[in-house]
Amino acid sequence: MEQLHQKRVVVIGSGPAGLTSAIYAGRAELDTTVIAGFQPGGQLTITSEVENYPGFAEGIQGPELMENMRRQAERFGAKFVDDNVTAVDFSGPVHKIFVEDQLYEADAVVIATGASALWLNVPGEQRLRGRGISGCATCDGFFFRGKEIAIVGGGDSALEEALYLTRFASKVTLLHRSAKLRASRIMQERVLNHPKIEVRYETTIEEALGENKLEALRLRNTRTSAGRGEISQFALEGLFVAIGHRPNTDLFKGWLEMNEQGYLIVEGETGTKIPGVFVAGDVFDYRYRQAITAAGSGCKAALDAEKYLEQLVERPIERQTVRLVLEQNDTLLAV
């Protein structure tokens, strides 16, 4: 028998969207719990300096910003559970969120699970992760002091990490599969004018080489050899992957509508087809994907949830305690 927790609002996720939702729900004096995950804070916890978030004229470190937002939510009464959601049940008027043997029942849910980094899925990559290959420049950049490294990608995040890595590396080579970068103009100017950064266009990675650590990459120049691409070997000691993200929506398959990429589909600003279930942040926003837009949608989701809950005052939901029956292989049998 799982332990039951009855809440007015449960927020799933603890990035800018989730924490902003928790701040607003807490200020509205709604009984709010945030299921923060094993790695609370979202993508900003692996971002170095955030210089475009309003209110910080000199910029702020991503982890510091997230910690400040969490303390602010706690100030208004939000409770935090640093664990992962294992299942949800949106079949009834009371929404059920399972965290191992804990059951949270909520009248309103805000889904702010964000997105996760993508990997190249080339030979040698998985074996050499943590041995020269990383997906987090701010986590691992220090270990490459004085070394020659590469980063793959062409968006703002990739260029930001390339600039950050110049603090440590002797040289940073940016590898991009297309002939043009996707990043904003200001980020491109910074990278192209930086003396430590070289950009290689129309280049893809075929394989990561090395036994116990990364020693080289097999690269393909896609413009040469009649489109088949010329293969070369590039010696280096570190590779950072920054090629995009995948929305963290597997939990909600079968419950909520998604597009082909797995991003949740919203109705109106933050709503879903299920009353009382709202969405915020990068879990649906595949266009802007900025901290400030995530926070803004988190605000909207909390306000929409508050209005929804006001409508329940005249027609309160009858709660029922449920049992979760599991086989040894953790297959959900009945709820």
Image (cartoon, helix red, strand yellow):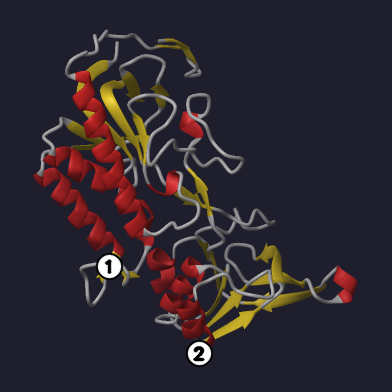
Q: Amino acid at mark 2?
A: Asn
Evaluate if marks 2 and 1 touch, with contact meaning CB atoms under 8 Å apart.
no
Q: Secondary structure at mark 1?
A: strand
Which one is nearer the viewer's eye here, 329 or 189?
189
- Reading the chain from its start, which is encountered first: label 2 or label 1? 1
Q: As drawn, is 177 to the left or to the right of 69?
A: right
Rendered-image quadrant of the C terminus: top left
Residue 64 lies, with reference to residue 196, above or below; the image says above
Camera-side mark, 2 or 1: 2
Q: Residue 236, can we see it? A: yes
- Report the residue marked by disc 1: 61
Figure quadrant of residue 80: top left
Q: As drawn, is 303 to the left or to the right of 279?
A: left
Q: Residue 100, can we see it? A: no
Residue at 66 percent of width and 58 percent of height:
124
Which one is nearer the viewer's eye here, 327 or 281?
281
Mark 2 Cα shell of 10 Å, populated few (<14), some (14-19), many (≥20): few
Residue at 44 percent of width and 62 percent of height:
136
Q: Amino acid at mark 1?
A: Gln
Figure quadrant of residue 283: top left
Measured in 3D between alpha carbons, the distance from the residue under mark 2 to the one under mark 1, in whole angstroms, is 24 Å
- Expressed as whole percent of the image width and height from the top left, the position of residue 159 reads 49, 73
- Report the residue marked by disc 2: 193
Residue 74 lies, with reference to residue 323, above or below; the image says below
Total marks placed? 2
- Expressed as whole percent of the image width and height from the top left, the position of residue 194 reads 48, 88
Residue 275 lies, with reference to residue 151, above or below; the image says above
